[in-house]
Amino acid sequence: MELPSFLSHPAWFLCSVVLALVLRLQRKGSWEARKCRTDLTGKTTIVTGANTGIGKQVALDFARRNARVILACRSRERGQKAVEEIKKETGNKKVILSILDTSSMASVRAFAERILSEEKRLDVLVNNAGVSGLPYAISAEGLEITFATNHLGPFLLTNLLLDLLNRTAPSRIVFLSSFMQGLGNIDTSNLWGKNMEKKKMNDSYNDTKLMNTICAKELAKRLQGTGVTVNIVNPGIVKTEAMRNYNFLFRLIFNIVGFFFFKSAQEGAASTIYCSISEEAEGMTGKYIDSDCTTILPPEKAQDPAINQKLWEACESATNLHTHWRK
């Protein structure tokens, strides 16, 4: 089929190239990790889901800053490969792998036990691991997989490591949420019950990202005055493997559009690194940070104290967690 004449004009091609370059430049945030001189010598960090995407870029940055970096990954093969790549690129030998599957509360508890027995300090915990596009499924523990992976696992992990984080204070906790949380909804009477199979795949993802924000804000409130800060990050739309569970056509369109409009994993990691190690974020807690490292208000759905309290208690019940941090 012949293209319309205006599309074949050289000026159209030139304008398209210029527009693409402008869009790529606009993806760059106002804060740049490479300009931050924070040194992490003597500090210990954990990044979940660190074998690829944003998590790997965050772990790579921490390693460059001389931190002890624990990559908490589900796959031993992919995790070890990431460890070797980070060691080779940074020369940091204090990069290790520890197996963690956030969809399994048993795996979360085993991971936390290892950390508490092997590590003397924990300065930064980045809850990055997550999934999208999974069909409805129930785990062996009776939990819906997307909800367990994206929210209940990180919720339980963070609470189990709080004593170590508190002993190391000042320390930082970072949760990765998403701009999609604005489409999420919270029904505290049926968070992961029988009606979950009626939800669309994206609905479950959106709900869990909203839950991440709510519980992070609630935790920040409970930890006021301890020296442990908690912040939430929206990394923006980033080209990662997060779309791997969607069909081929959807992934193809995502990758084509993403080349022009979306951030790379390195660019998308900036706001997480900002909250984790920057001087600007020192002492900052309970904040929602966008992809340009700017503080913004979270959705109104995340600002109801009564809902926040109910969700926290529902998560405690779902994970059989008994925490002394309740206020």
Image (cartoon, rainbow, N blue to C red):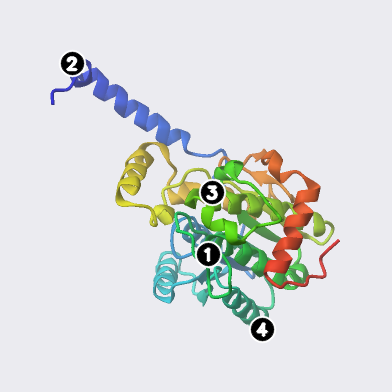
**Residue with the mark numbered 4:** 117
Secondary element at image label 4: helix
Q: Residues within 10 Å of mark 3 (few under 14, many from 20)?
A: some
Foreground tag (3 vs 2): 3
Q: Earlier in the sequence, mark 3 or mark 4?
A: 4
**Residue with the mark numbered 1:** 145
Q: Quadrant of the N terminus?
A: top left
**Residue with the mark numbered 3:** 203
Residue at 76% from the left image edge and 62% from the top image edge = 313
Foreground tag (2 vs 1): 1
Secondary element at image label 1: helix
- The residue lying toward the viewer, choosing from 252 and 72, is 252
Any mark on residue 129, and which? none
Q: CA distance from mark 4 to mark 1?
A: 28 Å
Count of numbered marks:
4
Relative image position of residue 159 (x, y in whole percent): 71, 68
Q: Residues within 10 Å of mark 4 (few under 14, many from 20)?
A: few
Q: CA distance from mark 3 to mark 4?
A: 38 Å
Foreground tag (2 vs 4): 2
Q: Earlier in the sequence, mark 4 or mark 1?
A: 4
Horizontal side of residue 119 vs 76, given as left or right: right
Disc 4 residue type (three-letter): Ser
Q: Earlier in the sequence, mark 3 or mark 2?
A: 2
Inspect this view and state whether residue 36 appears.
no
Disc 2 residue type (three-letter): Ser
Horizontal side of residue 216 vs 273, given as left or right: right
Relative image position of residue 57 (x, y in whole percent): 48, 57
Q: Earlier in the sequence, mark 2 or mark 4?
A: 2
Any mark on residue 5, and which? 2
Disc 1 residue type (three-letter): Ile
Tag 4–tag 1 contact (CB < 8 Å): no
Tag 3–tag 4 contact (CB < 8 Å): no
